[in-house]
Image: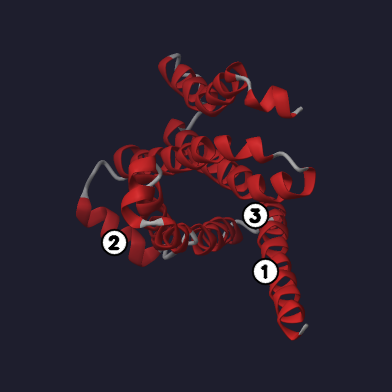
C-alpha cells in the first residue's frame, strides 16, 4: 500500500477524483440537466463536495498515524485545496446565480438567513490556509507558525457543520448534517485524545 501511495499515478488519480465532481456539475449545467432549480443544484452540489473534501483532509492524519502510512501526507495539500476550491465555487454559485452579484441583496439575505454568514466565515478561515499551502509559505512562516495558522481548519470545520445544520434545520432535515457532524466530531475528538495522551506521556517522562 505504501508503494502504491508513493506512485505518481496514484497522485494523478487523486487529482482526477478531486476535479471530477466539478467537471460533472459543469457538464450537467451545460446540458441543462440540473433539474428544475439549476442554481440550487449548483450551490448544494459544490457545498456538499467542499464538506466531503474537508472531512477527507481531516482524515489524513488519523489514517496516517493509525495505519503507519506517512506517504498520505503528500495528498493532504491536494485535498485541502480541493475543499477550498469547492467552497469558493459554492460561494460564487450563491452570489452569481442566486443573488445576481447584488451586494445589497446579499447583505439583506445574510440578515434574513444568518447561516449564510457562517458559510462565509468558513470560507474566510479557509482562505489563509489555501494561500499558505505551498512550500515557500512554510519556509517563510516557519514550521511552528505555519502549524498554528493551519489549525484554523478546526474552527472552519465546526462552522461548516453549523452552516449546514442551520440551513437544513429550517426544512426539518438534519439527518445528513448530523452524519457529517459525527464524522468531524470523531476526527477532531481523535486529535484531542491524542494530544492529551501525548501530554500525559511527556509528564510521566519528566517525573522519571
| Residue 34, label in figure | none
The colouring scheme, among rainbow, by chain, secondary structure or one colour, is secondary structure
Neighbor class of circle 1 (other Cα within 10 Å; few <14, some 14-19, many 20+) is few
Q: Which residue is mark 3?
A: 177
Q: Is residue 161 above or below residue 60?
A: below
Q: Quadrant location of residue 170?
A: bottom right
Residue found at the very far bottom of the displayed protein: 207
Q: Quadrant of the C terminus?
A: bottom right
Q: Position of residue 180 (x, y in %)?
A: 67, 52
Q: How many numbered marks, from 0 up?
A: 3
**What is the spatial separation of the Cα atoms under label 1 and label 3, in whole angstroms?**
27 Å
Q: Secondary structure at mark 1?
A: helix
Mark whose residue sits in front, 3 or 2: 3
The mark closer to the camera, 1 or 3, is: 1
Q: Which residue is at the front of the view, 170 or 61? A: 61
Q: Earlier in the sequence, mark 1 or mark 3?
A: 3
Residue 167: where, in percent of width, then height?
53, 57
Q: Which numbered tag is attached to residue 195? A: 1
Is 163 on the left or on the right of 189, as rendered? left
Give the answer, above or below, for where 112 lies relative to 173: below
Q: Is residue 63 left or right of residue 134?
A: right
In the rendered view, tell whether residue 97 sits above or below residue 155: above
Return the disc, 3 or 2, that comes first in the chain's sequence: 2
- Residue tagged 2: 108
The answer to which quarter of the image holds residue 88 is top left
Residue 3 position within the rendered picture, expressed as x and y whole percent measured from the top left:
71, 24
Amino acid at each position: 500500500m505504501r508503494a502504491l501511495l508513493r506512485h505518481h499515478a496514484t497522485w494523478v488519480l487523486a487529482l482526477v477524483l478531486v476535479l471530477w465532481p466539478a467537471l460533472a456539475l459543469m457538464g450537467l449545467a451545460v446540458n441543462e440537466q440540473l433539474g428544475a432549480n439549476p442554481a440550487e443544484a449548483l450551490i448544494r452540489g459544490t457545498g456538499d463536495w467542499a464538506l466531503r473534501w474537508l472531512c477527507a483532509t481531516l482524515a489524513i492524519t488519523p489514517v496516517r498515524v493509525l495505519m503507519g502510512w506517512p506517504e498520505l501526507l503528500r495528498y493532504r495539500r491536494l485535498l485541502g485545496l480541493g475543499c477550498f476550491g469547492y467552497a469558493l465555487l459554492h460561494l460564487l454559485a450563491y452570489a452569481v446565480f442566486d443573488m445576481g452579484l447584488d451586494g445589497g441583496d446579499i447583505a439583506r439575505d445574510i440578515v434574513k438567513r444568518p447561516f449564510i454568514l457562517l458559510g462565509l466565515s468558513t470560507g474566510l478561515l479557509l482562505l489563509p490556509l489555501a494561500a499558505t499551502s505551498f512550500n515557500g509559505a512554510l519556509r517563510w512562516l516557519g514550521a511552528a507558525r505555519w502549524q498554528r495558522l493551519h489549525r484554523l481548519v478546526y474552527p472552519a470545520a465546526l462552522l461548516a457543520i453549523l452552516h449546514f445544520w442551520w440551513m437544513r434545520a429550517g426544512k426539518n432535515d438534519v439527518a445528513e448534517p448530523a452524519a457529517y457532524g459525527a464524522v468531524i466530531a470523531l476526527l477532531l475528538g481523535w486529535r484531542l485524545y491524542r494530544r492529551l495522551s501525548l501530554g500525559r506521556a511527556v509528564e510521566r517522562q519528566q517525573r522519571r
